Image (cartoon, helix red, strand yellow):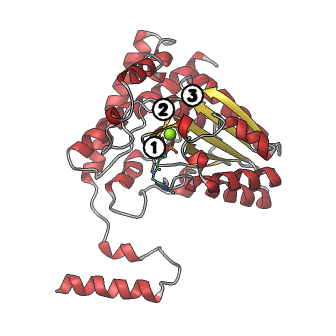
Amino acid sequence: MHHADLRELHRLMLVARRLDEEAIALQRQGVLPAYAPAKGQEAAQVGSAAALDLARDFAFPGYRDLGAAVAMGVDLVAYLATHLNIWHGGLYDPRASRLAPFNAVVGGPVTHAVGWAMGATLDDTGGAAITYFGDGASSQGDVHEAMNFAGVYRLPVVFFCQNNGWAISVPTGRQVAGGSVAARAAGYGIEGVRVDGNDVTAVFEATRTALDRAREGGGPTVIEAMTFRMGPHSTSDDPGRYRTLEEEQSWRDRDPLVRAAARLTAGEVAAAEDHATEVVREVREGLLALEAPPAEELFSFVYREPTKALLEQQRTWKESLDA
Ligand SMILES: Cc1ncc(C[n+]2csc(CCOP(=O)(O)OP(=O)(O)O)c2C)c(N)n1
Ligand SMILES: [Mg+2]
């Protein structure tokens, strides 16, 4: 990888890290109701999303994938607005940004990505889908059906698993039988690779290879990025109740940002910090300035034609306003 590319990936990772810290602060200040921190997973998210071709590909994220949104150039105020809970999903345009609304259903985005990949094949668009999910999600039935279906039809999809060691308080060893998500790919007749998820270069290369293969008709790939969730599962979790400080310390030494920064000059790292500070300031101001959309919209866009039940709810809601 060229030095300039590494510098750019580090810059994106640092924006993700600082924005993640800001999101936690905003949650503590009562601005965001809840947030799922991504600290420690920046190399996995940024490295993989940076490998996408935004003219053709499409990404399906989970709830902890801020780094993917950063790397894809999604409007970050509109992205983080999802956490404000003032609308259905975020305020960004998934079709224009190529990033689906984030999904809090464990394993949910995996089936969506496979469906999209089926459509891309039928329409012969030449694009590939990437889906983000966790080690815990990999034990969900839907994920296995999605992988099997993608294998049978050799669909252009990359199953990007961030194995961060934990599914809330359950360690990977207690819910991934056989110990490897990547190894499961063999059962579906598809490629499976394990990659150092805290090495942004390795993640980028592995994802680019998998996306190229998918677009060329070579079928799906499971990528298992080995990483660590350095913070809590969510802003209402206390990891001290289920894991040790020794484990956390051993991963602090493998921090993806420290590893990338070690390959850059002090001046480059300082410039990236200045840039991240500026982005965070703008996003914070943008979020605080957002007005809630008209409450009436709660009933729009759910169905093409509203159902009787929905109209009934809308009527009750309106009456409650007048009361
Ligand atoms: C279908 C479904 N079941 C259960 C939950 C509750 N839940 C939220 S996150 C989570 C653990 C997911 O772990 P993993 O897939 O490893 O992702 P991580 O949170 O570590 O990024 C669970 C069980 C959910 N959101 N959706
Ligand atoms: Mg996990």
Q: What crowding class fits label 2: few (fewer than 14 Cα within 10 Å), some (14-19), or many (20 or more)?
A: many
Q: Is residue 246 left or right of residue 107?
A: left
Image disc number at residue 158:
none
Q: Are marks 2 and 1 in contact (CB under 8 Å)?
A: yes
Asked which secondary structure carries label 1, the reply is loop
Q: What crowding class fits label 3: few (fewer than 14 Cα within 10 Å), some (14-19), or many (20 or more)?
A: many
Q: How far apart are marks 2 and 1 (CA)?
A: 9 Å
Residue pictured at 47% horizontal, 84% vertical:
306
Residue that label 1 marks: 64
Q: How far apart are marks 3 and 1 (CA)?
A: 15 Å
Residue 321, percent across and down? 21, 82
Q: Ligand 1 near label 1 (Cβ, under 8 Å)?
A: yes
Residue that label 3 marks: 197
Residue that label 2 marks: 41
Residue pictured at 77% horizontal, 60% vertical:
123
Q: Are marks 2 and 3 in contact (CB under 8 Å)?
A: yes
Residue 6, percent across and down? 55, 21
